[in-house]
Amino acid sequence: METFNEARLSIVWQQYLKDGRILSPLEANQREPVFLQFGNTSQIKLGVRLQDVAQSPEELNLALKENNMPFLLGVRNDCICVCLGTEASVHDEIRAVCQAVCISNMLGCPTATVPTSQKPTQQRLWEMVHESHKLLDAHFSQFLKGVKAAGWDTKRTLLDWDEWRVEWKTKNS
């Protein structure tokens, strides 16, 4: 299949981050797991309600920090939650999943200075979200060009979104 589901997108994105190579649909399909995998990765919930990302005005401000995209991300109970804005396009959805995969990777590979038994603080979780924004700002447009050139259909996806959409406005300074 030339369309992305969560598994194929994760496989292609992680390969790109590893060595800059874009897998073809055939290569990614061959790597896609047949059975659900249980492991250290965090669950990603797509299309959640706003309250699943931000439960206070302070958290909403943190979700909006360094974010000019029509989606918000947050981490709750070991789940990476993605809340879509009303204007989010298919490319925005692909980017949001790539960003959620980055956060999942960060949660699965804590730094050596932090004991693995210790969960990250809420502040550290928001720092991970902000770091993922910077990573996507640096790499996503090139990645998107590469997947199109490799034969992926980026006009539609098979990502499993719940259809919550939210509209938010920020105050202009």
Image (cartoon, rainbow, N blue to C red):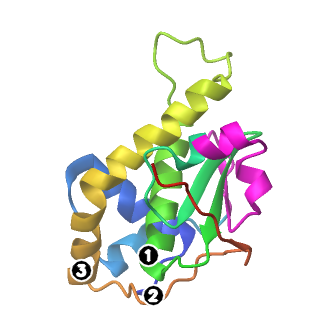
Marks 2 and 3: which is nearer the front?
3
Q: Amino acid at mark 1?
A: Asn
| Label ID, residue 29 | 1
**Which residue is labeled 3 in the image?**
150
Badge 3 or badge 1: first in the primary sequence: 1
Residue at the image position 41 percent from the left and 48 percent from the top: 133
The amino acid type, in three-letter code, at marker 2 is Met
Task: Specify the amino acid type for callout 3.
Answer: Ala
* 150 relative position to 172: left or right: left
- Whether the magenta-drawn stretch holds residue 13 is answered as no
> Which one is in front, 2 or 168?
168
Give left or right: position of 39 versus 6: right
Residue 121 appears at what percent x and percent y? 66, 22
Secondary structure state at the residue bearing disc 3:
loop
Q: Residues within 10 Å of mark 2 (few under 14, many from 20)?
A: few
Label 1 close to label 2 by CB (< 8 Å): yes
Within the magenta stretch, is there residue 39? yes
Rendered residue at 61%/25% (across/down):
123
Quadrant where the N terminus sits is bottom left
Q: Quadrant of residue 98?
A: bottom left
Label 2 sits on residue: 1
Kindly report the distance in space between the C-alpha atoms of the residues bearing marks 3 and 1. 13 Å
- Is residue 42 visible in the rendered structure shown here? no
Instruction: Using the numbered discs, state the Cα–Cα distance from disc 2 to disc 3 in whole angstroms.
Output: 13 Å
The span shown in magenta is: 36-61
Q: Is residue 88 above or below residue 17?
A: below
- Mark closest to the chain's N terminus, 1 or 2: 2
